[in-house]
Amino acid sequence: MVDLKDLIREVPDFPKPGILFYDITTLLKDPVGLHWAVDSLANHYIGRVIDRVVGIEARGFIFAPMVAYRLNAGFVPVRKPKKLPAETARVEYSLEYGKDALEIHRDAIGEGNQVLIIDDLLATGGTAAAVAQLVESLGGKVAGMGFLIELEFLKGRDKISQYDLHSILKY
Amino acid sequence: MVDLKDLIREVPDFPKPGILFYDITTLLKDPVGLHWAVDSLANHYIGRVIDRVVGIEARGFIFAPMVAYRLNAGFVPVRKPKKLPAETARVEYSLEYGKDALEIHRDAIGEGNQVLIIDDLLATGGTAAAVAQLVESLGGKVAGMGFLIELEFLKGRDKISQYDLHSILKY
């Protein structure tokens, strides 16, 4: 049996000293690991109606489309400002230092759509909470949030506890 | 029958005046369109051994992983400098104004691996040629290049004519 954690490379001091980075590229390049990770994320929602799966630029563009494909849903990108060409909704959120903003196309999600938010990493939960706000501002329902990796010590789960959360690998 | 071109939104003057932008987000959010696009890209290679599918940050992270999933291959990201945490190979290439660089993990591709390069757009071919160089520098064989959209008037195909090229929608 594959242990997915064996496929994650731990890189100390990246991107800066004191940070232990969980590198998923070693999992992604492994066909079995890739398939298992996608199916572990997607199978949690099988049997439920999912209209859209949202992914966040840039690394979040990797898993969210595969989960959308697996669930026969559509994929919606959330991008950094000024990247999306049509009319957008925008959310600002706080980072460790300063602020950042994300955008979504206004016509990407319809009233009452069941929307899944999928990302590779749940850290502080700030990004996921901001994206949920975007989805709800367009009339969508957040049907769930799925993460490949959850850094439990950062307690991101507390910030988004009103949603159905699902994570595969906990550290 | 779905005409995939009907699902692509044409946005004039984006990102700057005089450019007609082909917006794929309207296709991505449509479950049937998404499935059809991925399968059209992937089915061209069915029956051949494909070890890795390479995608380029950021928009290229959308289709390449889905094609990898569909073909039971691994996915390898090519990223902007300093984003990848382990040892990388690097290529520089020319843009309309100035230069840009891309990186790949050195251990992402093995000697003799059959590698597919998948992107949403073939424009001038400069990025695809640079990525092929990266793949070959690691000992990989470029088994093919697949694009959702080919802008034929830019003649990108001429720059990468030594490879097996496959594009779905031509403009």
Image: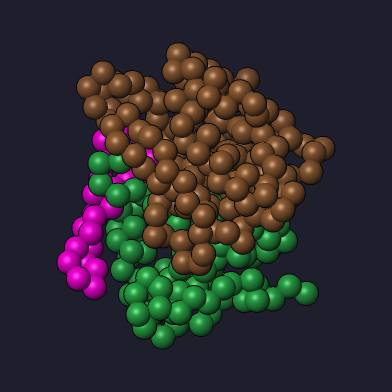
Chain colours: A brown, B green
Is the N terminus of chain B in the top left, top right, bottom left or bottom right quadrant?
Answer: bottom right
Residue in the picture at 74% in, 35% down: A45
Q: x, y (%) of residue B53?
A: 48, 51
- Above or below: residue B22 compared with residue A135: below
What segment is highlighted magenta in the picture?
B85-112
Can residue B131 be spotted in the picture? yes
**Magenta stretch: includes residue B10:** no
Task: Name the residue at the right extreme.
Answer: A47
In the picture, residue A2 is in which quadrant? top right
Residue in the picture at 37% in, 22% down: A10
Residue B42 lies left or right of residue B56; in this view the side is right
Residue B23 lies left or right of residue A114; in this view the side is left
Residue in the picture at 51% in, 64% down: A87
Residue nearest the viewer, comparing B18 with B86? B18
**Magenta stretch: includes residue B87:** yes
Residue B119 lies left or right of residue B108; in this view the side is right
Q: x, y (%) of residue B5?
A: 62, 76
Residue in the picture at 66% in, 39% down: A142
- Above or below: residue A50 compared with residue A74: above
Residue A16 lies left or right of residue B65; in this view the side is left
Q: x, y (%) of residue A11?
A: 32, 24
In the picture, residue B169 is in which quadrant? bottom right
Can residue B86 be spotted in the picture? no
- Above or below: residue A49 compared with residue B44: above
Q: x, y (%) of residue B32?
A: 72, 61
